[in-house]
Amino acid sequence: MANSIHEGRMTAMRWLILFVGVSGKDNAPVEARFRLPTDMRIDRLDGGILFDLNSPEAIVLEKIWRGCSQATSHPTQDTNHPNVEVGPLAEALQIIITHLERTIYAAKGRSLLHDTLIEPV
């Protein structure tokens, strides 16, 4: 069960990082591209702004995206992919939450944290 939970966390984190517009190439952040017309990215929403690929946080997100992509592609053990344990995933999640708050939630006068953790809708 713990392995399934961890796989789910990595898959969700990889999707969130792509959603804010970050993927990677040659161990560097690059803009996540649409593959299908039905693909969703933050810039398709009101107030949605792609993540700044020149920020130091983009490097963190790219590493987690790469690590999650490599770790969920096939079973791995003792490999050199970036660390995707709970601590690094939590750091990436905080970066994404902050970005969502500043962009799509602010555009609607809402708060992600308030809506999800403080006051039920």
Image (cartoon, rainbow, N blue to C red):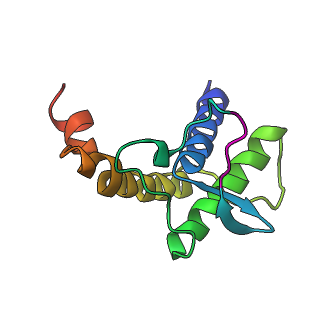
Counting from the top left corner in percent of width and height, residue 71 is at 76, 45
State the residue at coordinates (81%, 62%): 80
Quadrant containing the C terminus in the rendered view: top left
The one nearer the camera, 27 or 54, is 54
The residue positioned 81% from the left and 39% from the top of the image is 73
Task: Give x and y (percent) for residue 43.
Answer: 48, 49
The one nearer the camera, 44 or 85, is: 44
How far from the left and from the top, in percent, is residue 110?
A: 20, 43
**Image mark count:** 0
Residue 35 belongs to the span the image colors magenta: yes
The residue lying at 51 percent from left, 51 percent from top is 20
Residue at screen point 30% across, 52% down: 101
**Residue 13 placed where, x, y %?**
56, 44
Q: Is residue 38 above or below residue 46?
A: above
Q: What span is in magenta?
A: 32-36
**Chief secondary structure of the magenta portion:** loop
Judge whether residue 15 is colored magenta: no
Residue 74 higher or lower than 31, as above or below: above
